[in-house]
Image: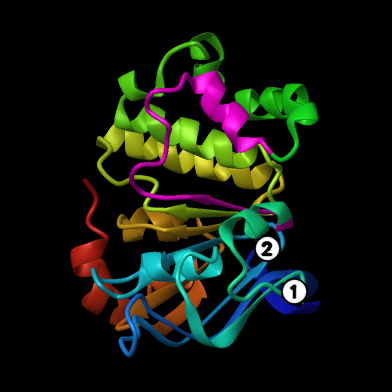
Amino acid sequence: MSEPVSESDPAGSTTVQEREVVVDVQTLTAGYLPGINILTDCNLVAHHGEIVGIIGPNGAGKSTLLKAIFGLVNVRSGSITLHGDDITNLSADQMVAQGVGFVPQTENVFQTLTIEENLQMGLYQRPKVYPERLEFVLDIFPALKDRLKQRAGSLSGGERQMVAMSRALMMEPHVLLLDEPSAGLSPVRQDDAFIRVSDINKAGVTVIMVEQNARRCLQICDRAYVLDQGRDAYTGTGRELLNDPKVISLYLGTLGQDD
C-alpha cells in the first residue's frame, strides 16, 4: 500500500514521491472501560522511514493510541493495518512477531536481570540471531557494551531507557512505538534520547513517538499529530506545526517549553 506524500528538499522545492504506508490507523475508537472511550474516530498514518510524533495535552489519549496499536487496549471500532494487513486487536506477542516493537514509559526493563539478560528476553522468539542483533543494538547504544553484566535495576532512568529501546530492537522491528522517551530525564539526557531516536530511524526503523517535550519532538519528526480529547485535532510536518499559530497558542505554549 502506498500513497502520494509531499516532501520538501533542502532548497525548498516540493516533490511528490510514492512512499509505502507502514501503519494506517483509521477512525479508531478505543478505551479501557466499557462505555467509556478514550479515543474517538482517531486517525494516524506512518510511512516507511518516518518519525511520526504524537503530542497533545495530558489526558488527550496519546499513550492510549500507542497501546491500541500494540494490542494492549481494546479497539471498539475502526481499523489498524500494518503493510496493508489488518492487525486490529492482535495480541502483543503477535504484534512483536509481525514486526512492531513497543517501549512503555515506565516499568520498561526487568530490574532483577542484567542488561544482557534483558536483551535476550527481547529475542525470545528468535534466539539464534542473538549475536547479529546484539551487534546492531550496540552500534546504536555503545554505552551498553561494557556493562552487559550489570543489573538493570541499578541503572539511571536514561540508561534504563537505552536498555528498553535496545530490547525492543532485538526482534528487528519494522515499526517502533515509543511512549514518552524523554520523560523524567535531565535536559542532557533528553537530548541523548532524541539523538538515539534519530539513530534508530536512520537504521531503517519507522518510529511513532508520543512525547511530552512537544517542541523538541516537532524538531526531529517528519510529521506529527496533535491529539485533543481523543481526536487528531491537527496534523502536518514537524516544521508546519512548529510554526502554526493555533498549535503554538493552544499547545506549544505549555507543552513545548524548553527545559
- Please check the rendered image and state whether residue 7 is part of the magenta-colored stretch, yes or no: no
Secondary structure at badge 1 equals strand
244 vs 221, nearest the viewer? 221
Work out which quarter of the rendered image holds the N terminus and state it.
bottom right
Side of 26 relative to 245 (left or right): right
Q: Which residue is mark 2?
A: 9
Residue range corresponding to the magenta coloring: 98-124
Give the farthest residue toward the front. Answer: 34
Q: Where does the image place residue 68, in percent across and percent down from the top left?
A: 49, 70
69 vs 75, nearest the viewer? 75
Q: Where does the image place residue 27, in percent across and percent down from the top left?
A: 53, 89
Residue drawn at x 35%, y 42% as measured from the top left: 107
Q: Where does the image place residue 117, in percent across and percent down from the top left?
A: 54, 23
Tell me which amino acid carries mark 2.
Asp
Q: Is residue 251 visible?
A: yes
Secondary structure at badge 2 equals loop
Residue drawn at x 72%, y 62% as measured from the top left: 48
Residue drawn at x 48%, y 37% as measured from the top left: 164
Side of 53 relative to 92 (left or right): left
Q: In which image quadrant can residue 131 be found?
A: top right
Q: Residues within 10 Å of mark 2 (few under 14, many from 20)?
A: few
Q: Which residue is mark 1?
A: 15
Side of 221 relative to 173 (left or right): left
Q: CA distance from mark 2 to mark 1?
A: 8 Å
Whether the residues at callouts 2 and 1 have beta carbons within 8 Å, the answer is yes
Is residue 163 depicted above or below 143 in this figure?
A: below
Q: Where does the image place residue 112, in percent across and percent down from the top left?
A: 39, 23
Q: Residues within 10 Å of mark 1 (few under 14, many from 20)?
A: few
Work out which quarter of the rendered image holds the C terminus and state it.
top left
Tell me which amino acid carries mark 1.
Thr
Instruction: Report the number of numbered marks.
Output: 2
Q: Is residue 239 visible?
A: no
